[in-house]
Amino acid sequence: MGDPPILQFAPFSSAVDAGFWHRFTQLKLDVLHLSEEPVDLVGSYANSDAQGLPTRLSVEYDALDGNQQASSTWSCSAPGTLINTNTIEEFKNRDKVEILRKKSTRLWEAITSGDAIKNPSVLASFLMFTFADLKKYHYYYWFAFPAFTLPRTVPLVQHPQPITSVFTDDQISSLLATYSSHEALVSQGFYSIALTGNEFTLHPLSDYPTLRESSADNKKEVFLGFSDPCTLPQNPGWPLRNLLTLVALKWSKQWPLHRIICLRVRTRNAVKEAAHSIVAEVNLEGLVDPDSVPEMPQCLGWEKNERGKMGPRMVNLSASMDPTNLAESAVDLNLKLMRWRVAPDLDLGVVQNTKCLLLGAGTLGCAVARCLMGWGVRNITFVDNGKVSFSNPVRQSLFNFSNCLDGGHPKAEAAARTLVEIFPKMNARGVAMNIPMPGHTVGESLKEQVKQDVASLEKLVEEHDALFLLMDSRESRWLPTLLGAAKHKLVFTAALGFDSYLVMRHGYRGDDAGGSSLSLEKEPPVNGKPIPGNMLGCYFCNDVVAPGDSTQDRTLDQQCTVTRPGVSYLASAHIVELMVSLLQHPDRGLAEAQISQDHDAKEGVLGSVPHSLRGFLCRQQHLPLATCRFQQCPACGDKIIAAYRSEGFDFLLEVFNSPKYLEEVAGLGQLQQCAVESQIWELSDSEEDEE
C-alpha cells in the first residue's frame, strides 16, 4: 500500500479596500507620527465566494476603527497587526523572519494556553507590514498569514468528499438552518457541529471534547467545522491549518481521527445553498506528543506578490486618494447597493447624466437640489433673482447666516456654491435673472432687458433635460411651461399651500420636428383606462383664464408663501422621486398615468408613475390624480406653441403686457363667451318657466 493522501491548503490572498489607505493616511499623520509600534486592525474572510475566486482575506476601510467584528454580515473576523515603517529603506531591510516570529509567538501562546479554544478567531490572525509614501500616495505592503508546521503533514483517511455525497438533502437543509441562526458563532470562523439523525446543531469550538465524549452513548456524529473561504473542490482554506495544530496538541491523543466540515455557503435568489462544501477526515495519531508542550515550531505564511514571487506589493493611489474622488466613490456606492438586491434593473447612469434646471432657489429649490444629489444627479442649475434674507436659512437648507450679510448674497449663486461645498464633484451654477410673466407690463425702457432674459431662459431650457418649476406665483410658471413644451423637455411643478401641496409632471410632447406629437382630435381614454404621457395636462390645463399679476394689492402674508415647514420637504421629495421614477420607466416621458383602480398603468423599475400628487397634512392624505390635456390651454395648447414658434419674442411681449391677448390666442375668450351665453340662456329659460 502507498502512503496515505496528504491534505493541502489554499493560501490566503490579500484584498485591501482603497478607503483603508485613506483612513491609514489620517492615522499616520494625526496619531502615529514617527511611531513604529504595532497597531491592531481587523480583517475578514467569507465562505460565500463564487467558484474560481481566490481565498481572500479582506481589509476594509474601517479595519482600523477598533471594531473586532467583521464589517460584513456572515463574514468571519480575523485579528491583525499592522507594523508601519518610516522609510522605504527600513521597509526593505527589516528582518522579515524576525517580524513573523514575533507575530507567531502570540499565536502559539494562544494555542498552547487554550485561549484559542475560547476565542478561535485568533487562528486566522495575520500581519500587515507597510510603508506609506504620503507625498506620492504610494503604499508598499506585505501580508503574512502565520501557520505552524505542526504537524508537518496532515494524513487524510480519504480524499475530501463533496458534502452532497456524505449527507442527505434533509441533513444539509438542517445544517444550513442551524448555520443561519448562529451568526455570532459563525463570525468566529471555527465551531463544533453535531449530527443526530437528520438534525444538525452548531456549538462553540470549546464544546468539541464534550460532544465527542457523549457521542458514543447517544449515537451522535461530531465534526469540527469552519467557514471555508476556499472555492477549490479538493482543498480547504488556509485557516484550517492552525485549527489542526490546535487539535493535534489538545485532542489527538484521545481521538486521533477527526472529521471536518469545510462549510461554504452561497446565496442564490435569496436562498442559501452549500453544495460546494467539502468533508475531510484526518488522522493525527502519533504526529505530536500531547503530554508535553513542544517548543514553537517553524512558522510560515508570507504572501507571494502579483508576480508569484516572495515580495511586497505596491498600490499607487495618487489619482484616487484625493478626498473628492473618495467622496464620489462613497456617493456612488450607496446608490449601487440598490442594484444588488432591491432594484437590479435600476439605471443609475440615466439619472446621473440628467441635467436639471431648478427655477427657484428658495425653500423648494434648496430641498429639491439636496434630494437630486442623493440620487446622484451631477448637473444642477439654479435660476432666481432674489437675495438671501435673514428669514431664509432656517427654512432653506443651502443657506447660512453669512449668506444674509452685506445685503444678502444672490440666492442662485449661493445655492450653487453650497452644492459644490457639499460634494465637490457637482457641476452646479447659479443664474440671477428675472423670469418675464404675463400681466407684468414691460415698458419701453425694460424691453431690451426682458428680451435678454427671455433669450437666456430659452438657452437654459435647451441646455437641460428636466425643468423644475419651484416658484412662488402662478404666472411665473407660464413661460417655463411654454418653453418646456415647445422644446420637448421633461417639466415638473411643485406648489405649496398652508398645509397642502401639489407635485406633477407635465404632459410630454415628444421629439416632434415642427408640431405637436399629439393629435388632440384623438379621443381621450375611456372607461378609466390610463392616460398616455403625451395626453397628460400641464399646470395650466385646468384653467379657463390666462395667468396675470397675482402680486397686486396683496398684504405681506399674501405675498409670501405661508406654509407649514414640513410641507416643502414632502413636496420636494415627491417631485424628485417622480422624476426618477419617470426616468426608470421604459416609456420615459410617455409613461401612462393611472386614473382608475380598475385599470393598472404600465409599471417601470420603480413602479407606476402618477400624473400628479396632492397631499393634505391636515388629513394626512395623499391623492394621485390625472387629467388630460386641454386644447385651449394658455400654456401648452397647440395654438400657443404655434404662435410662439412663428412670432417669437413679439408674441411673448404682447402676452406680458396683456393676458387677455393670451386668452384670445388660446381660444379661452371664445370659450368664456360661450359659457356666458349659456348662462344667459339658462336664466331666460328659468324666467319663462316662472311665467
Image (cartoon, rainbow, N blue to C red):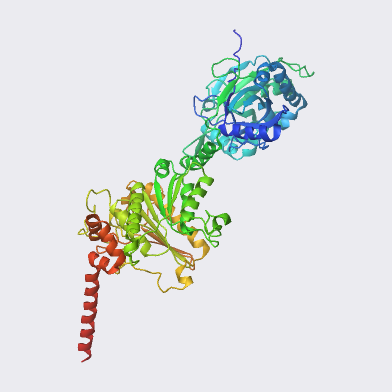
Kindly identify the residue that appears in the image at 68 percent across and 26 percent down.
84
Residue 392 shows in this picture: yes
Q: Nearer the viewer, residue 524 or 576?
A: 576
Which residue is most to the right?
Answer: 292
The quarter in which the C terminus is drawn is bottom left
Residue 251 position within the rendered picture, expressed as x and y whole percent measured from the top left:
72, 23
Residue 567 position within the rendered picture, expressed as x and y whole percent measured from the top left:
49, 62
Residue 62 position within the rendered picture, expressed as x and y whole percent measured from the top left:
62, 36
Residue 445 position within the rendered picture, expressed as x and y whole percent measured from the top left:
34, 62
Which residue is most to the front?
Answer: 445
Q: Quadrant of residue 292?
A: top right
- Tell whether 370 sits left or right of 359: right
Which residue is most to the top?
Answer: 1
Q: Nearer the viewer, residue 146 or 149?
A: 146
Kindly identify the residue that appears in the image at 28 percent across and 54 percent down.
486
Residue 603 shows in this picture: no
Count how many numbered circles sit on residues in the image: 0
Q: Nearer the viewer, residue 236 or 457?
A: 457
Q: Quadrant of residue 9?
A: top right
The quarter in which the N terminus is drawn is top right
- Tell whether 564 sits left or right of 217: left
The relative height of residue 126 versus residue 483 in the rendered view (above or below) is above
